[in-house]
Image (cartoon, helix red, strand yellow):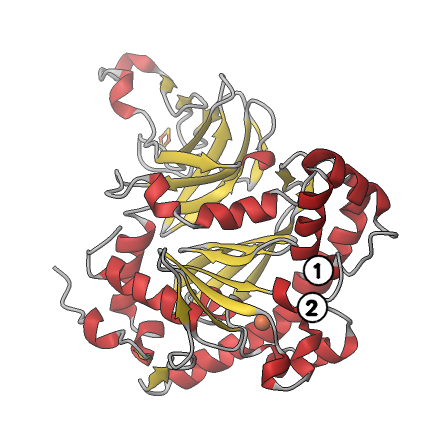
Amino acid sequence: MSTIDYEHLIQEDKVHGSLYTDEAIYEDEIEKIFYSSWVFIGHESEIKKRGDYVTRDIGRSSVIMVRGKDEDIQVIVNRCQHRGNLLCNESQGNKRNFTCPYHGWVFGLNGDLLDVSYPGGFDRPLEELNLEVLVTDSYRGFVFASFKEPTISFDDYLGNGKKLIDRSCNMAPNGKIDLKGGWIRQHFDANWKMLPENDTDGYHVNYVHQSFVRAIDSQYGDFVGAEDSIKGVIKNWGNGHTEIDFAPGYTKTLDWLGSTPEKAKSYVDSMREAYGQEKADQMLYDGPAHACIFPNLFLAEMNIVIFQPTGAHSAVQWSTPMFLEGAPELDFKLLRQSEGALGPASFLLADDASIAERAQKALGAGTPWCDLSRGLNRETEDTDGVKTSHMTDETSNRGFWHHYRDVMMGELS
Ligand code: FES
Ligand SMILES: [Fe+2]
């Protein structure tokens, strides 16, 4: 039974600084969030053919997401059941089966133990030593898994997150995204929760990203004006899923892509053909989601991002461009934009990493409270419980933290 008083540490309008720095809290959230319920693993498009696999780190464990013999997708623990060696050391590849490098045991793509070397000295039934398989489910190609049988169904966990995933996938004429670009990994000397918190924080944009706002004509442009000229909104969709919806601040179609219907004519034509003109034009105006799906997925407009905790004081952010099936003509632009936003020499990533590390340093020197009251005086709630407010308000951060509190107190999984 946890002795950490989360009810005290996470209040309606403030959270305690120790949530970012305390080692016991970090260990507790690895158990309660990353080992007990649904986490994002990867996307089906990363493993197109039978035997394709990628490895990911969840909690303290390495896992393998693999497309099996009958084309199904499994997530298995990357740890040999003999004496525990790491089965697969590569980040991606294609295999007929997994052979342990230590003593040569062979496991099938579904995790079954197929063969034990020098079997004369081994007398146990093979099926007792199959690899651990996670509970796995997916929505529109986004694969989620849980180490334990979750107490909440996948549908209930994802909740309104489905609408956010739909918004992103529907940017493709055939509704399918393709993560074929490979991943960039950025190490942060900061607690992992600063990443989802910051990514749907609309308040920092004009300060942390000032050079970007000034240099580039983008959806961040309206930050230069007064508070009431900012039209984007912040949303708490429930279940810890949060969003900045930039669409109300756009002034023209394809603002989010930094393009125009004339320049992207073949994309616009294929969207209209797929969805009908009226619906397609609305989607092309509104653009993709900018939203975090609790706990570790960020639909970062035309990028997909994963948050990986690596300690109380460190995290790794994975990012890859979100390519659209049926619109290969956008690939080059999307890759360049991804490099410009989240690559090693980019604008946004370096800004956000630097500000997160500064916050970690300051919070590590003491345990102050962090104020999260902004917008409590003006946020609205619809009949489904979705809360919306001005883009600079902390409605999204309160949504993240209050869900986190419920999970950590064992009231949800
Ligand atoms: S540890 Fe894998 S075969 Fe021995
Ligand atoms: Fe940022």
Say which mark, if any, is on residue 256.
1
x 29%, y 59%: residue: 29
Q: Earlier in the sequence, mark 2 or mark 1?
A: 2
Residue 43 percent location from the top left of the image: 54, 39
- Left or right, residue 266 beside residue 234: right
Residue 283 percent location from the top left of the image: 66, 49
Q: Which residue is mark 2?
A: 219
Q: Quadrant of the N terminus?
A: bottom left
User: Callout 1 environment at 10 Å: few (<14), some (14 to 19), or many (20+)?
Assistant: many
Q: Is residue 206 above or below residue 173?
A: below
Quadrant in the picture for residue 276: top right
- Name which residue type carries label 1: Trp
Residue 259 percent location from the top left of the image: 81, 58
Q: Nearer the viewer, residue 317 or 13?
A: 13
Question: Which image quarter has ligand 1?
Answer: top left
> Mark 2 touching mark 1, by CB under 8 A?
yes
- Left or right, residue 25 beside residue 195: left
Q: Is mark 1 within 8 Å of ligand 2?
A: no
- Name which residue type carries label 2: Gln
Q: Is mark 2 within 8 Å of ligand 2?
A: no
Quadrant in the picture for residue 329: top right
Q: Is residue 384 above or below residue 182?
A: below
Residue 146 percent location from the top left of the image: 34, 41
x 38%, y 64%: residue: 311
Q: Secondary structure at mark 1?
A: helix
